[in-house]
Amino acid sequence: MSATLSYIEKNSFIHRMTGTTKLLFFLIWSIAAMMTYDTRVLVGMFVTGVILFVLSGLKWREVRFAVLFMAALIAINLIGIYLFSPEQGVRIYGTRHELVHLFWRYSIVAEQLFYMFNFMMKYLAVIPIALLFIMATNPSEFAASLNKIGVSYRVGYAVAIALRYIPDVQRDYHEISQAQQARGVDLSRKDKTFERLKNSAAILFPLVLSSLQRIEVISNAMELRGFGKQKKRTWIMEKPFVARDYAAVAFAVLALGISVGFMIHNGGRYFNPFV
Amino acid sequence: MRETLISFENYTFQYRSQAEPTIHDINLQIHKGERVIIVGPSGCGKSTLAHCLNGLNPFSYPGKSTGTLTICGVEAAQASIFELSRYVGTVLQDTDGQFIGMTVLEDIAFSMENDCVAQDEMKRRTKEEAAKVGLLDKLPAAPHELSGGQKQRVSMAGVLVNRVPILLFDEPLANLDPAAGREAMELIDDLQKVNGSTVVIIEHRLEDAMHRNADRIILMEEGRIVSDTTPTALFLSDRLSLAGIREPLYITALKYAGVKLTEEIHPERMEDMVLSDAAKAQVCKWFENQAGPMEKAVPEQMLSVEELSFGYTEEKENLSEISFTVSQGEMVSIVGKNGAGKSTLAKLLCGFVTQKNGSITLKGRDLSEDTIKERAGYIGYVMQNPNQMISKPMIYDEVAMSLRLKGMSEEEVEKRVFETLKICGLYPFRSWPVSALSYGQKKRVTIASILVQEPEMLILDEPTAGQDFRHYTEIMEFLKELNESGITVLMITHDMHLMLEYTERSLVFADGRMIADTTPARLFSDPELLKRASLKVTSLYELALRCGLDPEAYIEKFIQYDRQVRNE
């Protein structure tokens, strides 16, 4: 099991799509999910997302850690909503069906449960697609796809270089932290928070310095090989747009259309089963 | 007369941040198809000169120049770094840092992408260049899947793809092991023959850089060119030793034997050398006059490693069944290819990782229960790059850090820190900031920050990597003094001079196993073992063979004699 998400080489039709397609799909899909609170649309998107995930050949164990981590975040988010506005659903749907009264201002209300369920579905509708985007997009194509949708290639490349250097910086961090532990820097939970914060500076200071050195070398190497010479650049890893890519983007637009269509039909962002 | 591609005329360059010019009054012509090596001690200005050639000066490092520098007919002062990159292709020293792409394919294509070359042509030309440097089967590989030598070849392909007339190598040997270094020089030679390029190599390891000869050697000192001549003429003069550059070993050996060097001998390369019978007899006579190796008392056993195994993952073992002992006061080199398990061994000894099987005992006490912190009290670890260790802006605080973390009283801390700074020759700098120090001095600070914990044993990772002869000597003499004061020293190294000159024993690693525990003299007379350790035979070995002597005995005597000479 790996704790971090990264590209895994596989051969599915999703992997064969261009990075730009997957980026566009992810963006349009996210907008569609963010706009609506309609349960029917969100459940539909979630199911579609899961199907696409299965079709991509990615395995549950490859994403288990990340999904559990996100599940924890969503849970915290939902608890927060309930604590701070336990009657939000009542305001939205205009009715109040109290199931159980707990204490003080907290009750279990059907409208609130429904609102929170929809809120959760918004995340669930996006997560499979986000995972697909991260794990089925070759990082080599990443800069090219950003560039293709209009982001400056300098920015795109900066992101790509950062991805390229994450393992190196991780390794540096590991080595530095070991050497500093040998000098008595304690990073275990035994010390007080402030001490631990102070101690992590003993690792960050050399890490920042060695990273700055890396940056100097890489930027020299890039300039010496003509980076930034012209307004445009070509990409050796860029794949041509084919029918499958157009189809995928059209599909995402369709999802957005359905989402908007239901909003117009409902006369708002919410689907209200209570009236 | 051949076409002149590079021409410096009364050229001076001063960085904006410096009060004085770094290079003065440079007059230098380099012609088409030539191979020129630029040598000089650290800080002599050879890197500045290189940066002026490729445009990093003043594009990335601002400064101003006087005089003229013309490259392929273009006035460098008026050209941009991009324009110069059409004529000068630069391969930097840091094999890993200059790898830009995610894969070999992308890295080679990088400059074509910037030139907006169409994709089909890029693919074709990338394959072509990858084939030339022997990496066609590595195109989809990521940098961490490649060795240092392979990464450097990717960089070479990445500049060759531009069809530049001039290739500039900035210390190409500094980050490579000796075997990979030799391959690099051979590849440069082959590529130059095929493409007819002009090659400029900045390097202080002269003997290795001369492996395939050169047309000229430019010697720089204090920002000026002090010698611009053929290798033969330079080796016959005493300019190299005056400038603090190490002479090739065979030249030193011949000088020890009293052989007179002349132009007829062809001293530029061991292979080209014409040794008369009289000269060979002189070498043999010197050999016979040397006393045999001195027997040493066997000191007390210090560290004992038994059947040690370790793997970062369940499936693969990175180290298997390692057993050796180290005695009190020894100085031992740990050698072998990158990835052979040397660093893993150091991590196991320091307790950074825990062994799967086997044991580590220090003075009869099993260390396996000790934490990293506790082990640091007996075994100190010094990383290769001092910038990765230094975490305080002031020297005093840096050295005091571990004591303060132990909760020692401030008077006690001061006493111990001052003592350590004195041992390390840093006492005069005690109130200085670390940033004001040279690389070698920073290295000392890191060693001091470990010594202050009073370990009985020091492990150093590549203590001399990238250092010129003067800094090398400075660091190693310091370590020798520490060693003589009773501290046991283990060094992970690729540096053959270090092994020969400073260690009595070498532990050789290959593919996670220890394949030899031997003396440097025996190691360097065993070509098969050297190959497995990614080292190479020295010219001493070849000289001994040419003179009909036993290489091991000859190397042994040479080392012993050389140590005496150095100690005088």
Image (tube, coloured by chain):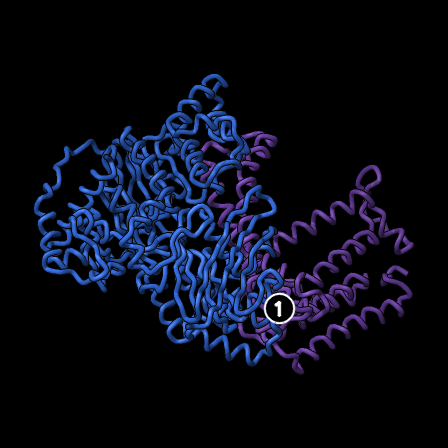
Q: Is residue B552 at all visible to an observer of this figure?
A: yes
User: Around disc 1, counting alpha carbons within 10 Å, would you say few (fewer than 14), some (14 to 19), or many (20 or more)?
Assistant: some
Residue with the mark numbered 1: A53
Tag 1 secondary structure: helix
The quadrant the C terminus of chain A occupies is bottom right
Q: Choose between B50 and B462: the one closer to the eye.
A: B50
Q: Choose between B399 and B181: the one closer to the eye.
A: B181
Which residue is found at the position 62% from the left and 66% from the top? Answer: A142
> What colour do you see for chain B?
blue
Residue B406 at x, y percent in the picture: 47, 25
Residue B360 at x, y percent in the picture: 29, 39
The picture quadrant where one finds residue A152 is bottom right
Give the left or right position of residue B112, taking residue A231 as reference. left
Which residue is found at the position 85% from the left and 52% from the top? Answer: A89
> What colour do you see for chain A?
purple
Q: Is residue B315 at all visible to an observer of this figure?
A: no
Which residue is found at the position 81% from the left and 63% from the top? Answer: A36
